Amino acid sequence: MGVMGNLLQSEFRKTITTGLWWGLLIPTVLLAFGWALGAGFVGKGFVDLASNADVEQLSDLLGVTPDQWKVSLFGIARSINIATIFPMIFGGLAISNEINRRTITTTFLTAPSRVSALTAKMLVYILWGAIYGLVIVLSVALGVSLSSPSSLLPDFEGWLALGIAGIVASILMTMFGVGVGALMTSVVGTTVVLLLYMLLIENGLQLVLASQGVDKIIGFLPNGSVNGLTGSVAVDLFLKSAGVVPSELEQVLRVVAGSMGAMDWWLSGLIFLSWTAIVFVGGWAATARKDIT
C-alpha cells in the first residue's frame, strides 16, 4: 500500500474510532425518516383535499387528476435538505476537533507533507459525505413510501435523480463544513455558526429578500443554492408529469420544494460548489500554515 493509501486508511480509522460518525448518523436517520414520513402524510392530505369538486378547475388547468400529482417529490427534497445539516456538522468537526484535541500535530508530523495529509482528509470526508447522503436518501425513501400511496411517488428515474442529487448535496455540505471548521478551529464555534446560519440567519434573510421582490438573490446564497440542487430536481420531475403548468404556479412549486429563487439544479449545484470551494480552500490554506506546537 502506497503513502496515500496509508494516509487514507489512517484518516478513515481516525473517524470511526471516535464514535462521532454514528453519534450523528442516528439523528440523521431519525430526522430524514421522520420528516419524510410527515411530509408524505401532508402530501396525501393535500391530494385528498384537491380531489374535491371545489377545486376541479385546478385539475382541468393542470390537465391531470389530483391523484396523479407527484407531490411526494417536494417532501423528498425538503427531507433531504434538512437532514444534510448533520453531515455538514460532521464535516465541521473534521479539522476543528483535531486542532482542539491537538491531534493535528501528530497528523502533520507523521505525514510526508501537510498537503498529502489534508488531501487524505479531504478524500475521506468526501467518502463520509457520500455515506451520509446514501443513508439520508434511503431513510427518506422509506419514510415517504410508508405514508404516500404509490401513485404519488416518483418512478425509478425520479428516485435515481433525487438520490444522486441528495448524495451530491450531502458531499458538498460535508466539505462546506470541513472548510468552515478549518477556518474557525473551534468545535463549539463551528457548530454554532453553521447551525445558526443555515437554520436561522439565511432563512430570515430569504424572507426579507422575498418580501422586497428580489428573491432571485436567494439562489446565490449558500443555503438557497444547496436547497435548489434537490428542490429544482423535484420541481422538474413534478412538471414532467403535471401537464401544462402556468409560469406563476412554477414559482409556487419552487417555494413548496424549498428552492425559492433557485436556478436550474445544475446551476444551483455549481453555485454551492463555489461556496464550498471558497471556504474549503480558505480552511486548507489556514491549516497548512498553522503552527504545530
Image (spheres, rainbow, N blue to C red):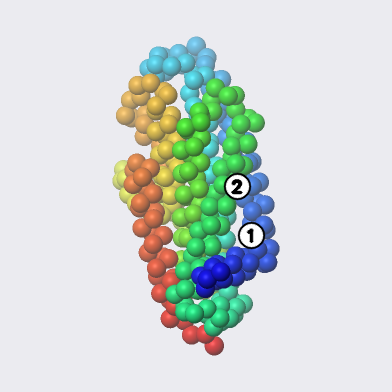
- Write the residue at 47% across / 32% down: 157
Disc ID at residue 88: none
User: What's the amino acid at mark 1?
Assistant: Trp
Disc ID at residue 135: 2
User: What's the amino acid at mark 2?
Assistant: Val
User: How far from the left and from the top, in percent, is residue 208?
Assistant: 38, 49
What residue would you read off at disc 1?
21
Location of the C terminus by quadrant is bottom right
User: How far from the left and from the top, in percent, is residue 234?
Assistant: 45, 35
Quadrant assignment, res 281: bottom left
Near-viewer residue (83 or 60): 83
Q: Residues within 10 Å of mark 2 (few under 14, many from 20)?
A: some
Query: Is residue 280 positioned above or below 268 on the image?
Result: below
Query: Which circle's residue, 1 or 2, is located before the other in the chain?
Result: 1
Mark 2 residue element? helix
Query: Is residue 284 positioned above or below 133 on the image?
Result: below
User: How far from the left and from the top, in percent, is residue 87?
Assistant: 55, 56
Mark 1 residue element? helix
Distance between mark 1 and mark 2 Cα atoms: 12 Å
Location of the N terminus by quadrant is bottom right
